[in-house]
Image (tube, rainbow, N blue to C red):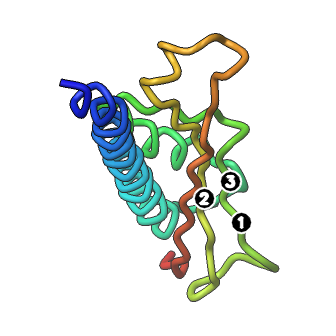
Amino acid sequence: MVEAALLLPIMLTILIGTFEAGRAWLDYNMLTHAVREASRMAAVTPVLKVKDMRVFDKLNEVLTDANIQVDYGDFMVVYSGNLRTGSIIRVWAVTNFEPVVTGLLPDSWAIAIPLRAEIVTRYEV
C-alpha cells in the first residue's frame, strides 16, 4: 500500500506528461498542415501581398476543424524583391499551445508554449 502511495504521483505525472506531449505534437502537425495549404494558395494567388487575406483565410479554414486559432498578427507571407514566377515565398504562422493541466493550476503558473510552422515554396503565377 505504501509503495502505491509513493509511485502513484510519479506514474500520473508520466501519464499526463505523455498525454500533453501528444496533444502538442498533434497541434504542431495541424499547424504545419494548415501552413502548407496556405503556401499552396499563396503560390498560385495573383497579385500576392504580404499578409494576404486570401492566404490567411485558407490557413484559418484548415485550422477551424482542429479548434486552433491563429491571429492575423501571428501570420506572414514573405518574399524578396519583385514577385515573379519562380520567386521564393515563405509562409509562416505561430499559435500558442496551452496544456490542459494548467487549468488545474493557479493562474500565475499558466503557461503557453508557442508553436511555429514555416513552409517555403515557389511562386507559380
Circle 2 residues within 10 Å: few <14, some 14–19, many ≥20 = many
Q: Which mark is residue 76?
A: 3
Tell me the element at label 2.
strand
Residue 80, image x and y in percent?
A: 78, 77
Mark 1 is on which residue type? Val
Query: The N terminus lies in which quarter of the figure?
Result: top left
Circle 1 residues within 10 Å: few <14, some 14–19, many ≥20 = some
Mark 2 is on which residue type? Trp
| Residue at the left extreme, as displayed | 1
Tell me the element at label 1.
strand
Query: Is 108 on the left-hand or right-hand side of 101?
Result: right
Circle count? 3
Q: Nearer the viewer, residue 116 or 92?
A: 116
Callout 2 touching callout 3 (CB < 8 Å): yes
Q: CA distance from mark 2 to mark 3?
A: 6 Å
Tell me the element at label 3.
strand
The residue at the point 24 percent across, 34 percent down is 3
| Residue 82 drawn above or below residue 74 | below
Q: CA distance from mark 1 to mark 3?
A: 6 Å
Mark 3 is on which residue type? Met
Residue 23, quarter of picture: top left
Q: Nearer the viewer, residue 20 or 74?
A: 20
Q: Which residue is mark 2?
A: 92
Q: Which residue is mark 1?
A: 78
| Residue at the bottom extreme, as displayed | 86
Residue 116, image x and y in percent?
A: 59, 55
Residue 45, image x and y in percent?
A: 51, 61
Callout 1 touching callout 2 (CB < 8 Å): yes
